Structures are given as structure tokens and as C-alpha cells.
Image (cartoon, rainbow, N blue to C red):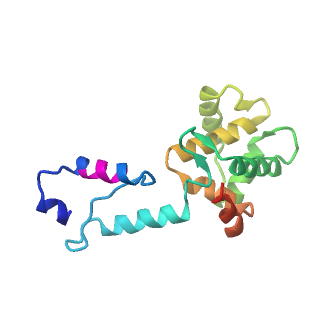
């Protein structure tokens, strides 16, 4: 902020555009000032979130698809969560998954809404037995696209994808 005020002819949009063109890996910019204590905390929070929940190991932003190793890991998690091995996560299995990953159960209406919403956007995402593998993977793609990377990272970590696995994912 301080430097931009020195040259008021440059708009915030112009300054951000120049930065993002020069450094294509930048996903977000925050205008801040340590001198004036403007948005300093937000910078550190975003930096922390970027380090804890990186997108690169999970998602190919160009093709808007999961990276192969991430997809394999999520398929394994789906199979481990499908206790009756019928190819779908029933309401009880979804609830067990939710409790394991997030320490909180889903309410019946939440499961109903999730399945209805999934059915609207992905015809084979839900069947009469529950959420299918394609629905499960689709949900993770949607979480990532909406910037909720911590959801997918939490799931991966709860199923044993630790620092060593994360490091190998970074090499994809």
C-alpha cells in the first residue's frame, strides 16, 4: 500500500496484474502495509493456509482435474470407507467417514441435501445404495475449485497421508 501511494497513477488492478503476469504461480494478492498495520494478519493467514493446504499436489488447474496420485489416494479412502463393499457410501458409511475425518456426525437432513445436490450435477454420483466413487471424487474436485483445500487435505491426512506422502505428492 505504501509504495502504491507514492505513485497514485497505478491502480490496484494494474499493480496486481503486473505481479501475476510476472509470477504465474501467484494465486492471490493482498494489499497490505506493515508500516500502517493494514491487513498484515491476513497476509500471514493466507501464507499459512497456502503452506498447510497446497493445491499443486492435489489438482491440475489447467485441466481442472485431480492429479493422478491424489485421485488414487481418494479412491483408496473411498474403498476403505465402503465397509459393505457395495461400491457406494451409504448414509451410515458417510456418517462414519465424516466422524473419522472431522470429528462431527452429519445430520440426516445434511446427508439428504448432499445427495440431492450431487444428483443434480452428476447423474452417476449417487445411486440407490448411496454416494458412488465418481460422486466422492467430484465432491473433492468441487471443494478444491471452491478454495476449500483444507477439506481434502484433512481427509488425506486422517487416512495416513502424512508428511512423507505429501512430499511425494509435491513431485507430481
Residue at image coords 54%, 40%:
62
Looking at the rendering, in which quadrant would you find the C terminus?
Answer: bottom right
In the visual, does 30 lie left or right of 112?
left
Tell me how many marks there are. Answer: 0
Front-most of residues 147 and 104 = 147
> Farthest front residue?
22
- The percent coordinates of residue 1 (x first, y second) are 21, 62
**Residue at x 71% of width, y 64% of height:** 165
Residue 19 sits inside the magenta stretch: yes
Q: Residue furthest bottom?
A: 35
Q: Quadrant of residue 41?
A: bottom left
Q: Is residue 91 above or below residue 77?
A: above
Q: Residue at x 59, y 32 (%)?
A: 117
- Residue numbers of the magenta segment: 15-20
Decide which of 103, 44 is in the foreground and name it.
44
Place of residue 27 in the rendered image (x, y in percent of width and height, measured from the top left): 43, 52
Question: Is 22 colored magenta in this rendering?
Answer: no
Q: Going by the image, does 22 lie left or right of 85? A: left
Q: Is residue 3 above or below residue 79?
A: below
Q: Is residue 52 visible?
A: yes
47 lies left or right of 59: left
Residue 132 visible at all: no
Q: Nearer the viewer, residue 139 or 54?
A: 54
Of the pair 120 and 160, the residue shown nearer to us: 160
Predominant SS of the magenta segment:
helix
Is 84 left, or right, of 7 in this rendering? right
How far across and down, in percent of the image, does residue 115 sit?
65, 35
- The residue sitting at 57% across, 41% down in the picture is 142
In x, y percent, where is residue 129?
Answer: 80, 34
Asked where in the image residue 111 lies, by quadrant, the reply is: top right
Q: Quadrant of residue 166?
A: bottom right
Amino acid at each position: 500500500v505504501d509504495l502504491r501511494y507514492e505513485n497514485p497513477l497505478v491502480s490496484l488492478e494494474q499493480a496486481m496484474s503486473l505481479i501475476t503476469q510476472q509470477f504465474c504461480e501467484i494465486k492471490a494478492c493482498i494489499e497490505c502495509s506493515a508500516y500502517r498495520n493494514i491487513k498484515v494478519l491476513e497476509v500471514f493467514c493466507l501464507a499459512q493456509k497456502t503452506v498447510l493446504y497446497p493445491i499443486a499436489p492435489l489438482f491440475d488447474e489447467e485441466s481442472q482435474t485431480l492429479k493422478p496420485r491424489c485421485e488414487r489416494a481418494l479412491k483408496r479412502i473411498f474403498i476403505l470407507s465402503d465397509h459393505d463393499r457395495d461400491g457406494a457410501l451409504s448414509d451410515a458409511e458417510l456418517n462414519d467417514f465424516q466422524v473419522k475425518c472431522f470429528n462431527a456426525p452429519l445430520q440426516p437432513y445434511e446427508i439428504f441435501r448432499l445427495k440431492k445436490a450431487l444428483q443434480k450435477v452428476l447423474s452417476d454420483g449417487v445411486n440407490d445404495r448411496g454416494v458412488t466413487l465418481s460422486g466422492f471424487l467430484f465432491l473433492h474436485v468441487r471443494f478444491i475449485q471452491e478454495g476449500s483445500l483444507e477439506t481434502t487435505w484433512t481427509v488425506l491426512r486422517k487416512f495416513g497421508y502424512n508428511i512423507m506422502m505429501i512430499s511425494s505428492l509435491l513431485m507430481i
